[in-house]
Image (cartoon, grey):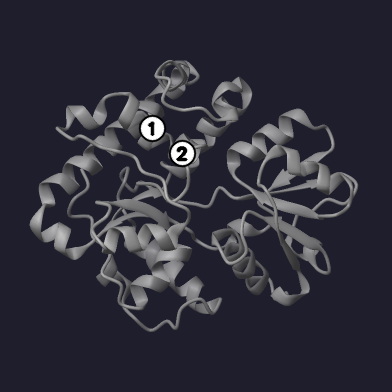
Amino acid sequence: MTFLPLESFTFAPEMMAYSGGYFEEHGLDVTLEPVQGTSAAIQSVVGDAAFITRASTIDIVPAMEDGQQIVGVGTMARQTNLRIASSTDDPVESTADMTGKTIGMGSIGGTSERALDLALTHDGIDPGSVERQAVPVTAATFELVRRGELAGYIVSLDTALTLDDQNDDAVVGPAGLDVTPDLQLYFTTPDTLENDPETVEAFLAAMADATQFMVDDRENNYDETLQILRDSGDWDFPALFDDEAARGALEVYTTETWMDDSGTPLMHTDPDVFAEAYDALAAGGLVEGGADPQDWITNDYVP
């Protein structure tokens, strides 16, 4: 299952595994069921309503520290792809540019707000100095920025690229949100690992194969990836049918997000980076700190 609707290239690996036949190749019959937010995703996995999902370390590490019965079994994303969209009239290019202003986000109290708080705290800025407003995180919301009702708003990479492409006055960038190591881990329960390790391995292998296909398709400018996803009829979201935004998003995902130059194999969790993420969350006050984060992850089931 997914922690948000499948309406962005964030979930391209799941989409490719489904539409490209990789789940079937590994003997799996998979239903991709979206839920609203990480809290619902965690409870669905813990309650056996879902087999496996992934979420940001910003959201799942506090649950791990609290003793929730979940184990990280693989890393899908190795960095945040959140961006802040603002205007050339009053650009937001760093956390300092947000002081005394209003920043929009999809929901109050979710991943975006936590990432914002961590970035502000890291840079020595009082989180209370930045107002927050829940807004639709679509390209249409940019009009609120133009009217001065928002200094900027937090968007996904897909939306960021679309905004940048369609608006000459758009300023889009991390603006400091990327200062904290933020991974997206697949997680399941210890009971699942004990009772059905073969299915966990098959799922992660299918995801790895689907992702590797897209990484390799970079040399074709992602033509085959887009053809499969578009022709399947399984998915419908704006960036998928916008050639520039789609190829731009896939370029970032295949070179910086799913893969990077660290030498860590695809889908594997780097224990040191995970420990850094835990320490950053502790410094930001989202967790108490002092635990051993290595107890909450394993690479035993990834290819």
Q: State if disc 2 and disc 1 touch (CB < 8 Å).
A: yes
Determine crowd level at label 2: few under 14, some 14-19, many 20+ residues with C-alpha closer than 10 A.
many
For the question of whether residue 55 can be seen, the reply is yes
Where does label 1 land, which residue? 15
Residue 16 lies in quadrant: top left
Whole-number angstrom distance, CA of label 1 to CA of label 2: 8 Å
- What residue sits right under mark 2 in the picture? 6
Viewer-proximal residue, 87 or 29?
Answer: 29
Is 133 on the left-hand or right-hand side of 293?
right
Quadrant for the C terminus in the image: top left
Tell which of 220 and 195 is nearer to you: 195
Q: Which mark is residue 231?
A: none
- Image-based side of 247 in relation to 143, left or right: left
Residue at the spot 43% in from the left edge and 23% down from the top edge: 229
Q: Amino acid at mark 1?
A: Met
Q: Is residue 282 above or below residue 10?
A: below
Reply above or below: 278 against 48. below
Secondary structure of residue under mark 2: loop
Residue 79: image x %, image y %? 49, 52
* Residue at image coords 64%, 64%: 116
